[in-house]
Amino acid sequence: MNIPIVFWLVPIASVVALGMAYFFFRSMMQADEGTPRMRTIAEHVRKGAMAYLRQQYRVVFIVFIVLAILFAFMAYVLKVQNPWVPFAFLTGGLFSGLSGFFGMKTATYASGRTANAARQSLDKGLKIAFRSGAVMGLVVVGLGLLDIAIWFLILSAFYQGDHMALITITTTMLTFGMGASTQALFARVGGGIYTKAADVGADLVGKVEQDIPEDDPRNPATIADNVGDNVGDVAGMGADLYESYCGSILSTAALGATAFAMNVDMQLKAVIAPMIIAAVGIFLSLIGIFLVKTKEGASMKELLHSLGVGTNVSAVLIAIASFVILYLLGIENWIGVSFSVVSGLAAGVVIGQATEYYTSHSYKPTQSIAEASQTGSATVIIKGIGTGMISTCVPVVTIAVAIMLSYLFANGFDLSMSAASISKGLYGIGIAAVGMLSTLGITLATDAYGPIADNAGGNAEMSELGKEVRNRTDALDALGNTTAATGKGFAIGSAALTALALLASYVEEIKIAMTRAVAEGAQFVDAAGKVFDPTTAQMPDFMEFFQVNLMNPKVIVGAFIGAMAAFLFCGLTMGAVGRAAQSMVEEVRRQFREIKGILEGKATPDYGRCVEISTRSAQREMIVPSFLAILIPIIVGILLGVAGVLGLLVGGLAAGFTLAIFMANAGGAWDNAKKMVEEGNFGGKGSDCHKATIVGDTVGDPFKDTSGPSLNILIKLMSMVSIVMAGLTVAFI
């Protein structure tokens, strides 16, 4: 296979991204970490975060070895699996884990330096926090594209010849997405349980019962709380978006291989197009990163504008670049496909703006939650739940419009529903997801910035820095709450588009599995008794053969199970946070009761004990929810076949997407309603209104940082597992 010269832009861009990530890391490390007290606090957080991550990787390592052995057995003994799958699966998990590790290492070194920079000016604090967050963004896109480039080159060397070569290559590459998804789910669930157990314990006992400030050094759970921000919102988010980024590129490449299967030259161009767009997106993200700056005393809207300049400039530039890239590649209907990319980009912007509107205390929805605190915590919770539910409308409609537009743009507004029309339309949906994630380098930087700013505020509080410094870190922290909520909405939106593209990839993998079975002597007979030939069949033929329609009870049952899985998953993770938080509350109360002199500042709390409780709880509680996401698609595939699996994935996607938006936005709004009161509104810190918003924020913690953001991984992981297990499903037909 002759790989075009332009493809080499992909590994080059990945190396540039990793090089710039290292540059930003070194620049951050050269900044002063502050006073001896600031250094000591940062070191406590750093050690706690790394200790947790080492423990988590031990557990995940065992899981990966067991699954790799299972895939090897399926590939080499049962022969229902591509022989490359076990290796691809392992590299996906490895690179996903590295993304989280490098991002968290940077964040734990950056928070103290951000607090120290805030002693000089707001702008210096913002730049250190944001560019440290950019390390995470650039590491994710750099490692993601590097993994994709390496596997494409390896598999291209082994598979040569007809149009089936690229289909086999791209569907095989999809399986390393399962490795990334599995690692991401463990990171998200485990990190989310850890951080919220510590956060709830610190808030309920420290702020509500003992009436001491957030991040007060007298609170035994405060170090665990700061550690949790890193393991959940940095390591977890990095692994999550690594998986989304790779999944969107790989699923689009697989759809391109199918859509243009009859034209080998065009097929190759369609396969590498999403990779090239992502590569160019790295360079344009770097431009946006250097544009982020602000002035002293900036308001929340001005701070949001500062970040918006960087992200919006990058988005506009990649939209323009997509037309140029697809034109130069000579993609069929390049104008329509380019507009599909723009549809994805526009959807990302709209979802981000909608999330900002519903979660920032600069706007009415969150302000009304703060106002509700005047009548107690119950009305805060009721108002927050209602706001979260209403907030689902704009993202859902936006994704629906983006799906329809990207589909129609890519197939030239062909409504015939022919096999060719459907394939090209689905390719458009996939490349819309790539468009949404093409500037992930800067988009993830705005998200990873949040926990860095939060920890900087904690460091400033515990180090007893001046009020002016604390005001600056509070401003950076409030901005981080909004950017984190925006990032979660963005991640969930991209998951919806990616999961839809993976649905089509699943059908293609079923086709390959059936073709492999036919080559070994198997026969498939349709309802009319006619032998079904998978080698020449198109997607509509498979839908008819497997009776994928709403009159088939298997599809309906699968859809119900998929919707139920989303709620079951949330229930399990919320329960896990509740149990872990209960242990934390009891421990914090014990220390206040038994260690004399803590509240007077004469004795030092046992921070290590709280870190240990969060670590142990997270490791124990993350196992069951994570394994459910893997087991449900396998069981449904065996019992209900392809029709049941497609119903499962559709039901999980519809319910999971809506539920995730609701939980993430409700949690973000509760958090910022509390921040609004802490700024002096409705009585300010220590008032009854403040305590009411703390209860709302505590309820919202697992919403926005555990269950909600984990759902977008769930819906993609179920798709990835279905694809990897397609051979096993076919064996039971």
Image: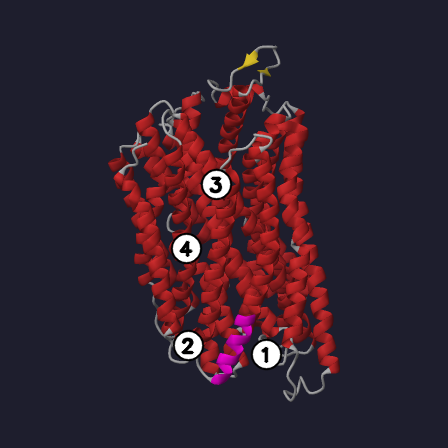
Task: Please indicate whether residue 626 sits to the left or right of residue 367 in the image.
Answer: right
Q: State which tag comes first along the sequence, 4 or 2.
A: 2
Task: Determine which residue is flagged by label 4.
Answer: 443
How packed mark 4 is, by other alpha carbons closer than 10 Å (few <14, some 14-19, many 20 or more), is many
Cα separation between marks 2 and 3: 39 Å
Query: What element does badge 1 sit on?
Result: loop
Q: Which residues are magenta?
A: 36-47
Residue at image x 50%, y 27%? 512
Q: Neighbour class for label 2 at 10 Å: few (<14), some, many (≥20)?
A: many
Q: In this picture, is 204 found above or below 244?
A: below
| Residue 657 lies in the magenta stretch | no
Q: Which residue is mark 1?
A: 216
Amino acid bearing label 1: Asp
Residue 498's tag is: 3
Q: Residue at x 37, y 29 (%)?
A: 160
Q: Position of residue 386 (x, y in %)?
A: 61, 53
